[in-house]
Image (cartoon, helix red, strand yellow):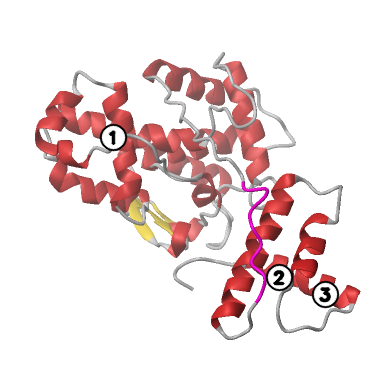
Amino acid sequence: MAGFKYERQERRMERFDQYCYDIGFTGDRLNMELVNEYCYSFPYERACTRYEKEKLLSELAEHLCTIGYPSYICGKKFARKKIPYMPYIFSEEELGKLFRAIDTHPSDRASSRHIVDGVLFRMIYGCGLRLSEALNLKLKHVDLNEGTLTILQSKNNKDRKIPMAKSLVDRCKKYNKEMHSFSGQDAYYFMTSFKNRIDNNTAYERFRNYLWYARIPHGGRGSGPRIHDLRHVFCIHCLKRWVLAGKDLTNLFPYLSVYMGHADFRGTQYYLRLTADLYPDIIKKMEVALGYVIPEGGGHEKS
């Protein structure tokens, strides 16, 4: 539906349906008593859970009203206050330290991380991937003859094929000999020793570990650096190279947007603003030719 998946909403509706069944509710419209009982009568629930219930039932009530069943539309007492996350932009020196920490991390007989992680994190940075896109890759999606990755059903159900740098292709060839000599085409490209997909949390734990070895401070949960910041850095470094090389950004900008898998130019425009903030001297070239697409601020690309 419109390119979005609704698994979480479906589960929430199932829980609400079960609640109505448990209390014996058989009405065909939502009333205030039912909504308030469901949203607020469980003192152990967190504010974010109550917010999700409010959101679910208000949208359901709006739908019922449009099809002829007047219903109570609850307010948002627990609406979340979003604090925009400011990406951590690694310097060239920090990237070098990070990848050295990954490459020199002690090997573990019980884990293949010493083989996997050097390629995994380089691919995220070198191709501007989201973590889920990298971890969902299968062997058949990595074409080393063409030097391309095929990303399927990514954010907003977008598919795309993207090229890799020759240095990354060469690393992948060596990686394939070590990890995939006997793998079928449906094997996860970045897999555990037990041939399973690497869990997102496991990837983050390793990343935090490498940051510590590289002496790059981490601000704690929600503060970064995050794995997703490698994607931000890829885009900013790309724009910086184009500006320094005198490239026509008006022609290249749409290609970058497609490469990143953005739904429209707004996601890519955010990186123009970051690049302008980080490199005010070189960005003067950009403002002459492309100032009209550089946003004043606010907004950010979501994971």
Residue 174 is at least partly visible in this image = yes
Residue holding disc 3: 20
Instruction: Depth check: give the residue in front, 278 or 52.
Output: 52
Asked whether residue 145 is drawn in magenta, I would say no
Region rendered in magenta: 71-79
Mark-to-mark CA distance, 1 and 3: 48 Å
Q: What is the secondary structure assignment of the residue under circle 3? A: helix
| Residue 272 percent coordinates (x, y) | 28, 35
- Residue 194 shows in this picture: no
Q: Label 1 neighbourhood size at 10 Å, few (<14), some (14-19), many (20+)?
A: few
What type is the residue that disc 3 sits on? Cys
Disc 1 secondary structure class: loop
Q: Furthest-top residue in view? A: 215
Where in the figure is residue 26, as x and y percent of width and height?
81, 83
Horizontal relation, residue 155 to residue 186: left or right: left
User: Residue 296, which numbered label?
Assistant: 1
Contact flag, marks 2 and 3 (Cβ < 8 Å): no
Residue at 45% over, 68% down:
3
Helix, strand or loop status at disc 2: helix
Q: Residue at x 52, y 44 (%)?
A: 131
Q: Amino acid at mark 2?
A: Met
Rendering quarter of residue 280:
top left
Q: Which residue is mark 2?
A: 13
